[in-house]
Image: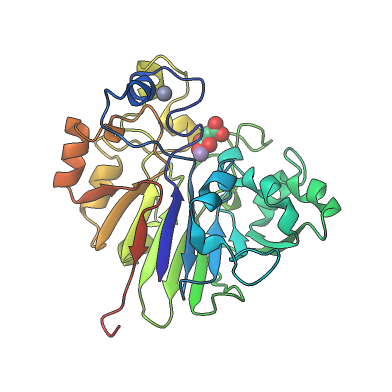
């Protein structure tokens, strides 16, 4: 299975356009050893030619421009993105659909709850019906494996996870199970698997076995501490309120990952306030000692089975 990180930052990106927190200003002035990051999205493939886009960020045009594999050769107009899967209806995961309008129709796989948000509070599905067939909804049923035409070796399973619905959703602070899912992606040919969960608020008994089963975890690294936005003076929301489990709590993500057998544990959806973005920070060094990687834009992950 081929995986490429198109964007590794949380909403706002890094540096965020209107932010002068220590990280954002340090990156701009060159005093911080860190890499700029766009908003969270990945592509996966079973052959390295045809790709499934998992989440469409507001930075999709820039991400496609620097990913030659997504440029379809031999056609006047086309794309190597053959299917799109959404894990939630957050602005940073769906706004990119607007920038893909010239390529409609697109197959968009998402749960009924996400589809409801995207036909009401943020009616992208409704708007894009005016562009050549628009977005064709493929309903995702939690825990029922599905496959997409262009990557037939990949099996996708949506696992409901505890997080939050977007600020614009009528279900903010009272999400239904379908508002947030993790994607368990398994290559049937090689047996290798990825768990992609850019928004994980609270691990529970539903997600736990999947966290254990996956060979590679690409998981929510939004904040180091729960009150990080408050401490940086940039916001009042806690990680928990936004549906993101802090890394460094006693029952936080680092502790959760410690007992998991995955060969690779990689953080994604990293907020610009997070000290792990500073490659020289003690927090980043602690992650390295724990065997936890921090994804960056353009990162490629190739999962190969024993026989391959
Ligand atoms: C989140 O991941 O919590 C959201 O992207 C936050 C936001 O939309 O501002
Ligand atoms: Mn987000
Ligand atoms: Zn900032």
Seen from the viewer's position, the closer of residues 32 and 21 is 32
Above or below 137: residue 227? above
Q: Is residue 165 visible?
A: no
The quadrant of the picture occupied by the C terminus is bottom left
The quadrant where residue 276 appears: top left
Task: Indicate left or right for 129 with 177 as reference.
Answer: right
> Residue reaching furthest right?
130
Front in this rendered view, residue 145 or 128: 128
- Residue drawn 36% across and 41% down? 221
Place residue 264 in its image quadrant: bottom left
Colour basis: rainbow
> x%, y% of residue 108?
67, 60
Assign the N terminus to one quadrant of the image: bottom left
In this rendering, would 122 be left or right of 280?
right
Give 63 or 169, whichever is nearer the viewer: 63
Q: Position of residue 15 (x, y in %)?
A: 43, 28
Residue at (59, 53) in percent of width and height: 178
């Amino acid at each position: 299975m081929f995986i490429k990180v198109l964007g590794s930052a949380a909403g706002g990106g890094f540096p965020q356009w209107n932010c002068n927190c220590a990280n954002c200003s340090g990156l701009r002035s060159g005093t911080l050893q860190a890499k700029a990051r766009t908003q969270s999205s990945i592509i996966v493939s079973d052959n390295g030619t045809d790709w499934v886009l998992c989440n469409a960020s507001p930075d999709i045009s820039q991400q496609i421009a620097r990913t030659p594999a997504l440029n379809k050769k031999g056609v006047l107009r086309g794309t190597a993105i053959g299917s799109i899967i959404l894990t939630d209806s957050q602005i940073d995961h769906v706004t990119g659909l607007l920038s893909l309008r010239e390529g409609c129709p697109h197959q968009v796989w998402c749960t009924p709850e996400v589809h409801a948000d995207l036909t009401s509070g943020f009616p992208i599905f409704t708007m894009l019906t005016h562009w050549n067939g628009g977005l064709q909804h493929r309903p995702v049923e939690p825990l029922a494996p599905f496959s997409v035409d262009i990557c037939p070796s990949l099996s996708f399973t949506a696992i409901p996870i505890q997080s939050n619905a977007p600020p614009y959703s009528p279900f903010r602070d009272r999400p239904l199970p379908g508002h947030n899912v993790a994607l368990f992606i398994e290559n049937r040919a090689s047996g290798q698997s990825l768990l992609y969960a850019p928004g994980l608020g609270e691990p529970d008994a539903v997600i736990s076995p999947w966290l254990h089963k996956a060979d590679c975890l690409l998981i929510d690294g939004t904040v180091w501490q729960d009150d990080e936005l408050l401490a940086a003076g940039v916001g009042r929301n806690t990680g928990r309120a936004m549906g993101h489990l802090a890394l460094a709590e006693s029952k936080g993500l680092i502790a959760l990952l410690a007992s998991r057998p995955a060969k690779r544990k990689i953080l994604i959806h990293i907020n610009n306030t997070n000290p792990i973005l500073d490659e020289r920070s003690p927090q980043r060094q602690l992650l390295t000692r724990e065997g936890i990687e921090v994804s960056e834009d353009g990162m490629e992950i190739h999962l190969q089975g024993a026989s391959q």
